[in-house]
């Protein structure tokens, strides 16, 4: 999604893909399908305005996305977050997810970010492996961060240092 001004159409596309993710992979998504279904479209358009979204497209349709946001503040503006990464199952293995991550990391570097961070569900081993392939390291765990159908899932905190500093 490259246009600077977000539209209702953009919000509809992101909303549809997000609901798809929530339906098919509930332990990996922080909010539920039912919650998202009740949100007004303006919620998704506002989210597009607040975050930087990168989109993957096939035949003009949004097939995946990844959100990026840099921290704001003198003590924390060296950090940025990767969020809401998703590619439709039919488009996995096409390089779309890699392109989305590379775009976000390029934006982070352009912003002067030294550390990219994310959380990933313990119930999402494929996502964990994807992040590890992109040099993210697990640095912590939020126990029982998600509860889906009365089953708890931890969230892993992962980081990638972009400045090469591997010290703590």
Image (cartoon, rainbow, N blue to C red):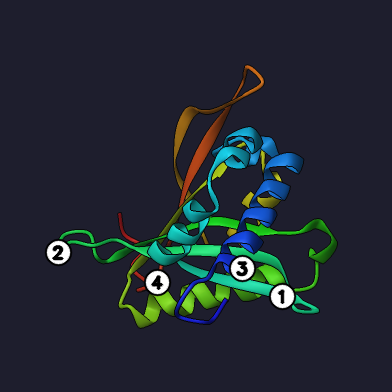
| Image quadrant in which you'd find residue 56 | bottom right
Q: Which mark is residue 160?
A: none
Q: Say whether residue 126 is visible.
A: yes
Q: Is 131 on the left or on the right of 160, as rendered?
A: right
Give the residue displayed 54% in from the left and 77% down from the top: 103
Label 1 and label 4: CA atoms lie apart by 27 Å
- x%, y% of residue 24? 76, 42
- x%, y% of residue 156? 51, 41
Which residue is disc 3 drawn over?
Answer: 9
Label 1 and label 2: CA atoms lie apart by 36 Å
Label 4 and label 3: CA atoms lie apart by 34 Å
Q: Is 24 on the left or on the right of 12, as rendered?
A: right
Image quarter of the N terminus: bottom right
Which residue is disc 2 drawn over?
Answer: 74
Which residue is disc 4 drawn over?
Answer: 162
Mark 4 Cα within 10 Å, few/some/many (few <14, many 20+)?
A: some
Which residue is disc 1 drawn over?
Answer: 57
Depicted 146 relative to depicted 151: above or below: below
Mark before the other along the chain sequence, 3 or 2: 3
Pair 1/3: label in front:
3
Q: Nearer the viewer, residue 12 or 66?
A: 12
Give the residue displayed 64% in from the left and 51% down from the top: 18
Residue contact between numbered discs 4 and 3, judged by CB atoms under 8 Å: no
Mark before the other along the chain sequence, 4 or 2: 2
Q: Nearer the viewer, residue 38 or 113?
A: 38
Pair 4/3: label in front:
3
């Amino acid at each position: 999604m490259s246009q600077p001004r977000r539209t209702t159409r953009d919000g509809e596309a992101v909303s549809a893909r997000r609901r798809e993710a929530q339906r098919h992979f509930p332990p990996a998504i922080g909010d539920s399908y039912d919650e998202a279904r009740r949100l007004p479209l303006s919620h998704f358009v506002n989210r597009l305005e607040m975050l930087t979204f990168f989109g993957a497209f096939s035949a003009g349709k949004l097939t995946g996305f990844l959100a990026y946001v840099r921290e704001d503040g003198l003590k924390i503006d060296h950090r940025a977050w990767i969020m809401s990464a998703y590619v439709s199952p039919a488009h996995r293995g096409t390089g779309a997810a890699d392109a989305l991550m590379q775009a976000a990391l390029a934006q982070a570097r352009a912003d002067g970010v030294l550390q990219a961070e994310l959380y990933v569900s313990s119930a999402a081993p494929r996502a964990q492996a994807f992040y590890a392939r992109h040099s993210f390291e697990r640095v912590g765990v939020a126990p029982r961060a998600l509860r889906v159908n009365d089953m708890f899932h931890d969230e892993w905190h992962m980081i990638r240092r972009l400045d090469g500093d591997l010290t703590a």
